[in-house]
Image (spheres, rainbow, N blue to C red):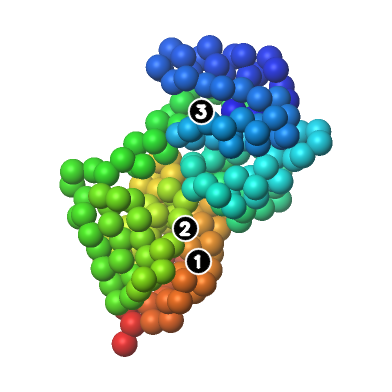
Amino acid sequence: MIDDDRELGDMITDFLAGDNLEVTVRHSGEAGIEEFKSGDYDLLILDIMMPGISGLDVLKKVRLTSAVPVIMLTARGDDVDRIIGLEFGADDYLPKPFNPRELVARIKAILRRAQPQAEDSEVLELGEIRLDSRTHKAGVNQNELQLTGTEFEILKRLLETPGKVVNKEYLSERALGRRLLPYDRSVDTHISNLRGKLEKAGNRNETIQNQRGVGYLLIPGT
């Protein structure tokens, strides 16, 4: 956890310990980056508003080398930082002030979806795109896709039903571990990031299309 609020850091550490979650807290972006480089962490809780290096700058640096899940802590109603954070590769966000139980629920949802599920197909393929749930890797032809956990989960759900619309409510529940809230653009932002990564990896045939007001579908190439 990287947050300059020391009291919040202590409270979250104690609360998560009750769920057998071990937390390391750093109180500046600089110290957080150094700790992240030296450690082996399953998830990062990142405050956006910090003196010195901001949370968004930390996120950009983390995403240069790691796809570790990131939950942002944002000011309530600060939609701009929220959207920018998702565009930079955050998996989810939680506005301050928040109920610690909600944070635990978000953490467990993210960690759970990072583990292969018995009911999931192991390998999904469509045209140039291939996704392997066993290794949690995806690629276009021979080019590996550097996806966040949320992007991986969204792509998997689209690959499971090619050519059919997957509604946003389902994508939010399966990829974010929470129900879709009014005016929540998280799924749309993750889809935009996924489109960009597919194109950058060389995909030219399959396309993700928006069914306005309903959801998204992955169109097979011709």
Viewer can see residue 49:
no
The residue nearer to you, when weighing 13 against 170, is 13
Residue toward you, 76 or 114:
114
Given the image, on which type of amino acid does mark 3 rest? Leu
Distance from Cα at disc 1 to Cα at disc 2? 8 Å
Task: Return the x and y of residue 171 as percentages of the image width and height.
Answer: 39, 53
Give the x, y percent position of residue 141.
Answer: 35, 73
Q: Please tell me which residue is depicted at 38% across the width and 77% down the height of the picture.
A: 206
Instruction: List x then y, in percent, for residue 50.
Output: 76, 33
Residue occupied by mark 2: 146
Residue where numbered disc 3 is placed: 103
Kind of residue indicated by mark 2 = Gln
Work out which residue is located at the far bottom of the displayed protein and give it.
222
Q: Which tag, 3 or 1, sits closer to the chain's start? A: 3
Tell me, yes or no, whether the two marked residues, 1 and 2, touch with CB atoms within 8 Å: yes
Which residue is identified by label 1? 197
Q: On screen, 138 above or below 203?
A: above
Are the two marked residues, 3 and 2, in contact with CB atoms closer than 8 angstroms? no
